[in-house]
Every structure is written in structure tokens, then in C-alpha cells.
Amino acid sequence: MAKVGNVINYEDCVIHVDNVSKSFGNLHVLRNVDLKLYNGENLVVLGRSGTGKSVLIKLISGLLKPDAGDITVLGQRVNDLTEKELMQLRLRIGFSFQNSALYDSMTVRENLEFPLVRNKRNLTRAEINREVEDVLDGVGLLQALNQMPSELSGGQKKRIGIARTLILRPDIMLYDEPTAGLDPITCLDINGLINEVQERYKTSSIIITHDLACAKMVGDRMVMLLDGKFERQGTFEEIFDTDDTRVKPFYDYNFIV
């Protein structure tokens, strides 16, 4: 089922990637790419593995620097920020990693408390408990509060990882292959959660994926990265209404047995 679409403010751009290039030696990963993420939007970035999708996230967050071009996030030109300013900006950006990045030696509660206490030192115990319980309820896992990561399924770990990201109330969410390694039913659950997060927490999100079922379910708009450039953008149907031989096999692999 394709996403019907959220109410998007197309005059309010929260991320602007402007004519950006990035190479690693002789490997040209991104070639003069342009991209905008609008307020309240779920934007899907499609592409094969190794095409530069994850590099894009690192550039947006300032973990990598572009060779050319500009990146503006929440009104700040990332290239110009000091390390301290970058750290402050990253508090407004939530990262959902492929492996959930939970600390195995901590309970779910402790995993969620860690970024909260580290970045908001003046909170009372009651406030911390309330924040932890709120985000756990938001991802449907309040009952896992005192469990260890080893006791959770892959899908539950993914949900807890998203909850830990949400606890700082980011303006922007960056999801890196959110359904990687999950079974089809759990993938549907995570896709639904991404939409719920957008609605409940009013986030603007970039979802990096090569899973077309995920793209179709969560994307308000999509772009496809081909040969280092965003060659196609629009709805799911508009992206794949083409005879481009670089695009059709991508669709066939996902949907044709």
C-alpha cells in the first residue's frame, strides 16, 4: 500500500543540499547533487548498495565534508560550523542506525536514559522517568523497560533504537536502512512506526533504503540515486514509470519473484 501523503510545508526547507560533490580518491560517489527536505516530510532516498546513500547522511550531519557545494540544515550552513556548533546541531538530528546501536550491558531504561542525562543534566528523576516512558510508549514497547537488549528480537531492538533517538526530541530523523535484516512482517511494523513517528513527533525525515516496500509505505516523496546523481524524483509511481534500464531491474528484484 502506497502512502497517501502528509501535509507538507513546501515553503519551509529544513535541509538543502546544493550542488554537492564527494569523492574518495578516484571513486566519485556524489556528483553535483541537489536535494531539499521540507518541514514535516518523509523523503525516501533510493539506490543500490554502495551508491552513496549513507555518505549523504554523513555529509548532512557534518561527519564528512563535501569536496564542493553547500549543505544547510535547519538554517545553518554546515560547512561553516565549528565542532562545538556541529555538536549542538546534531542534538536536533536523530540518527537511526542499521544495527540499532544499543549498549548490551545496559537495560532498555538505561539505554534511553544515557543520552537524556548526558545532554540535559538538570532533569529530575521524575522528569527522566516520564521522558523514558513516553518514548517507549511511542514505539509500543513500554513493557520492555527493564529488559536487556539480548532479550529483545531484531524488530524490538530497532524500535528501542528509534526510541533512544526520539528522547532528545529531534527536529529531523535520518533513518539508515531501517528494515535491513528484518523479516517481512517486522519490516511492515517498522514502516508503520516511521509513519507514526512523523505524525506523533512532527519530524522531518530522510529514509535511506533499497527496500521498495519500505519506500512505498513511508515516502511522501522519493528520489533515486543513480551514478552519483539524483536522476529521478517524485512519487513511487513516477519514479518507476520509466524504461530506464538502470531503474527497471531495481523494481523487478523487489517485486517480481
Image (cartoon, rainbow, N blue to C red):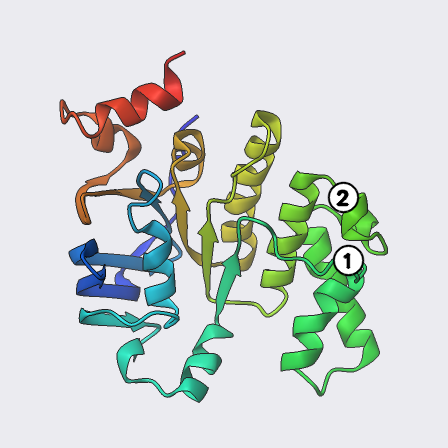
Relative placement, left or right, of 139 versus 193 is right
Give the amino acid type for the residue marked by disc 1 in the picture. Answer: Val
Q: Residue drawn at (77%, 75%), measured in percent from left and top?
A: 127
Report the Cα–Cα distance between label 2 and label 1. 10 Å
User: Which label's residue is closer to the chain start, 2 or 1?
Assistant: 1
> What is the number of the mark on residue 108?
1
**Label 1: element kind:** helix
**Position of residue 46 measured from the top left corner of the image (x, y, whole percent):** 32, 41
Q: Nearer the viewer, residue 213 or 51?
A: 51
Relative placement, left or right, of 27 versus 189 is left
Give the quarter of the figure containing the N terminus: top left
Q: Is residue 145 visible?
A: yes
Give the amino acid type for the residue marked by disc 2 in the picture. Answer: Leu
Q: Is residue 131 visible?
A: no
Q: Residues within 10 Å of mark 2 (few under 14, many from 20)?
A: some
**Position of residue 10 measured from the top left corner of the image (x, y, whole percent):** 26, 57
**Position of residue 38 measured from the top left corner of the image (x, y, whole percent):** 31, 58
**Position of residue 157 measured from the top left corner of the image (x, y, whole percent):** 68, 47
Q: Residues within 10 Å of mark 1 (few under 14, many from 20)?
A: many
Q: Which residue is mark 2?
A: 152
Q: Residue drawn at (82%, 53%), measured in percent from left and top?
A: 148
Q: Residue drawn at (75%, 57%), measured in percent from left and top?
A: 104
Q: Nearer the viewer, residue 75 or 101?
A: 101
Instruction: Confirm or deny contact between disc 2 and disc 1 (CB under 8 A).
Output: yes
Q: Identify the residue at the far front of this view.
A: 25
Give the quarter of the figure containing the C terminus: top left
